[in-house]
Amino acid sequence: MNSDVKILIIEDEGAIRNLIATALQTSGYMYEVASNGTSALLLLSTHQYDMVLVDLGLPDIDGVEIIKKFRSFSTTPVIVISARSNDEDKINALDEGADDYLTKPFNVEELLARVRSTLRRTHYLDNKSNEEEHIFTNGLLKIDYVSQSVFVAGEEIHLMPIEYSLLCLLAKNVGKVLTHQYILDKVWVNSIESDLSSLRVYLTSLRKKIEKKSHEKYIQTHIGVGYKMVRVVSAEEKQKNE
Ligand code: CA
């Protein structure tokens, strides 16, 4: 199935480009490469890709500019792979529409895991039928958007309205890192800076409620940046796939 997936690698350093290309090829993905921003934008505007991996430090155009331009005409997932490790750069790239972020030096296995999870998320969004839109499931977690109820392992969990809104926002963006500011803007109306500490408080309490019974980790903390809901593969699903 991977052979239907075509990924564009935008990276100016030959050694890293080859490392990524080899990893993708070994996993059965098709790929194309661009070594600068100009050729990347040309390829992006003329070809169809299933995913884009982009370095931020390119010789001609900043990677963030590429994401910004690309997002004006495409929703294809973008993963940033960059040596820039400060929070501001991550937040900036995510706010411009990147789906995930990997800091160099990176582990190839981790890159492949991010690629898989991002593809699963896109696949999930593409194949969702109307009925499924009412119900969100992830491992043992289930959200019924119509009755606004949440279940873990079949048991209903009682959430405060703000916890429920937080959970829905994360679920609707499963696999994507959401910045603190993005979450505050969506969940807290007229957010002020001090709301960041209350976001942490509600997030912690939400996490406790949904992770206690299932022992599954749904919400990842990206320190200084934000949060991401990850797709959990349950033991049952794992067996099915083997
Ligand atoms: Ca570079």
Image (spheres, rainbow, N blue to C red):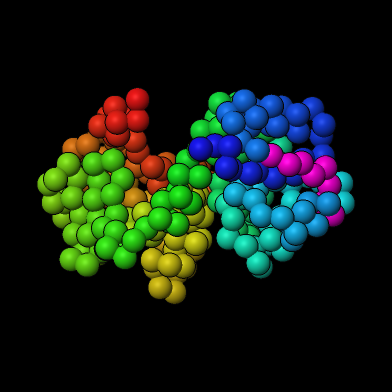
Q: Position of residue 201 (x, y in %)?
A: 33, 51
Q: Position of residue 100 (x, y in %)?
A: 56, 46
Q: Residue furthest right?
A: 60
Q: Position of residue 97 (x, y in %)?
A: 60, 58
Q: Position of residue 8 (x, y in %)?
A: 69, 45
- In this picture, is 167 found above or below 235? below
Out of 172 and 51, give the one closest to the viewer. 51
Q: Residue furthest left?
A: 155
Quadrant of the image containing the C terminus: top left
Residue 29 in the figure: left or right of residue 131? right
- In this picture, is 1 found above or below 206? above
Residue beneath the point at 18% across and 38% down: 213
Q: Magenta includes 224?
A: no
Residue 188 in the figure: left or right of residue 152? right
Out of 1 and 24, give the one closest to the viewer. 1
Out of 227 and 25, give the one closest to the viewer. 25
Out of 117 and 190, give the one closest to the viewer. 117
The answer to whether residue 97 is seen in the rendering is yes
- In this picture, is 240 found above or below 181? above
Residue 33's image quarter? Answer: top right
What segment is highlighted magenta in the picture?
A: 31-38
Residue beneath the point at 51% across and 33% down: 113
Residue 131's image quarter? Answer: bottom left
Residue beneath the point at 83% across and 42% down: 35
